[in-house]
Amino acid sequence: MSMWILLEALIKIFVIIGGLMTAAAYLVLLERRVAAWIQDRRGPNRVGIPLTNIRIFGLGQPIADGVKFIFKEEFIPGHVNRWLYVLAPSAMFVAAIVLFAAVPFGAVDLGIEGWEPIALVVMPGLDVGIVYIFAVGSIAVYGVVLGSWASNNKYAFFGGMRSAAQLISYEIPLGLGILGVVLASGSLRLDEIVQSQAETGVWNVFTQPLGFLVFLVAAFAEAGRLPFDLAETEQELVGGYHTEYSGIKLMMFLVAEYLHMVAASFLIVLLFFGGWHFWGLTGSEPVAGIGVALLRVVVLLAKFMLVVLFFMVARWSWPRFRFDQLMSLAWKVMLPLGLVNLVGLAFWIEYGRPRFSGANEWIVMAIGGWVLLVASWLVTTLLVPAASDNRPRLGPAAADLDTKEAASP
Amino acid sequence: MHTVVLPLVLFLGCLIGLAAALLLIGNLFGPHKITPVKRMPYESGMDPIHDTRRRFDVRFYLLAIAFLVFDVELLFLYPWAVAFGTGEGAEVAGGLSEGGPPLIFAGGMVFLTLLVLGYVYDWRKGVFRWR
């Protein structure tokens, strides 16, 4: 019995490690092509099969990049803290992949006598899946802080401080966004959260747009993607916390960062876009036969690709935030909005839901959610100048503000 | 229980092995030509003036404390959300009504009110002010 569990786990582990490494490599290529498309260039399209003239749309590029990373010099600068310097990229790499142990892809019944249905997740039966992901995702902060501290380099240090402050600040809106979903489905298991959306056919994004907005912004910040990539602003900080790294260790940092984006995309899809559910296509049973299970994986990956494409397009659509704007957004806008979403949802479950039934329940809930979103947006933009006025405070105005805030208790 | 944790231990083992193997491969195949300049910190070609590990802004500490408070309170809210969302344990906590269990709802709201009070205090004290 134990043998089979081991074998099953090993197969899943190899599939997920292989899949993620390949996905990271080829998503980088895709991102470069998307960037080129937006900037009206061609992008990497030359590397195909070596020693021939065959260029298959640059599909050889990630392999060439990987080989080059391996053959780069692997040295440890003289001024660094040796152990921490090596530990930081390894820890971040391991944590970025081990996070996927709780990301479910559905469950399949192979239809063989005496076989139990197989849950397509490395850790089946984990009741606190979302807490696990939240906890392991936080380890990224350690990688960043360790790397920047061990580097003993001022660029790395500033990047690390910024990144640590950013990551911990946005963890709170992230948690509030997740809490709304947990409250609505009453479970901490990702597969049950998807299941509850599949059974009603109403995805969480329709009923909790405010929670989705908070979660999306926080996920962008946690992944360190462009509007929030203060940690490694090339123009100011060279490379941020990985300024002093080269070769394989740099590759580990970059792969880990990319996998954060992949994880954020999966979470967005699973929590808010119904995971593997699509109306009329995938059914709503917890366990499916081989055909439907494959279809579900395809649906999940298709949604995932759409979210990833959104991440990539967003990168070239917004300018980077200033650091104080970033902090105000997290603490003064996203945190209250997350709380508003949570409290609104709790009031709905306590007082609103018992009064409606059937389809009406979901329609009213969705209308309430969207009204909450628009109202919060209006309040944020119109009534709270502290949040919307993001001009730099220098000179007499800043001194004035200081005395005002210091005078208040 | 061990059927849940065993795959995780395996996964962690594989990944640590993979990370170690990658480091080893890099060390085996890369060149090794250390020069004094290469061993210096990279600071845009300038000679570094002093060590990096000096005092830094106290705001980072304030932020870390604020984060700790809010994150721990969020962790308390997870079990509350599950209990309230499913209505489990309602018999012990105020009986079932048509909505969620009222006592769990009230408890959560009191908790959130305290959280908001702390949040307002932090804001007024200027913890979230970055200039």
Image: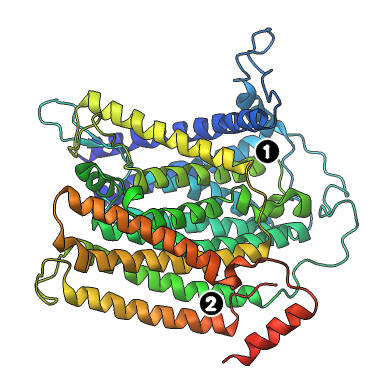
At a point 66% along the width and 36% down the height, the residue shown is B26
Q: Specify the quadrant of the image occupied by residue B112.
A: bottom left
Give me the disc on residue B65.
2
Callout 1: chain? B
In the picture, measured across the screen, residue B2 lies left or right of residue B26, that is left
Q: Position of residue A173 (x, y in %)?
A: 46, 62
If you read the primary sequence from the N terminus, does the residue marked by circle 2 or circle 1 appear first?
Answer: 1
Give me the disc on residue A239.
none
Q: Specify the quadrant of the image occupied by residue B79.
A: bottom left
At a point 69% along the width and 52% down the height, the residue shown is A232
- Residue A23 vertical position relative to residue A230 in the rendered view, above or below: above
Disc 2 and disc 1: Cα gap in Å? 40 Å
Both marks 2 and 1 on one chain: yes
Of residue A328 and residue B24, the one placed in the foreground of this image is A328
Give the secondary structure at mark 1. helix
Q: Position of residue B32 (x, y in %)?
A: 78, 38
In the picture, measured across the screen, residue A298 lies left or right of residue A293, that is right
Return the residue at label 1: B27
At a point 24% along the width and 78% down the height, the residue shown is B106
**Amino acid type assigned to the residue bearing label 2 in the image:** Ile
Give the secondary structure at mark 2. helix
The quadrant of the image that shows the C terminus of chain A is: bottom right
Q: Residues within 10 Å of mark 2 (few under 14, many from 20)?
A: few
**Amino acid type assigned to the residue bearing label 1 in the image:** Asn
Regarding residue B78, the answer to whether it shows in the image is: yes
Callout 2: chain? B
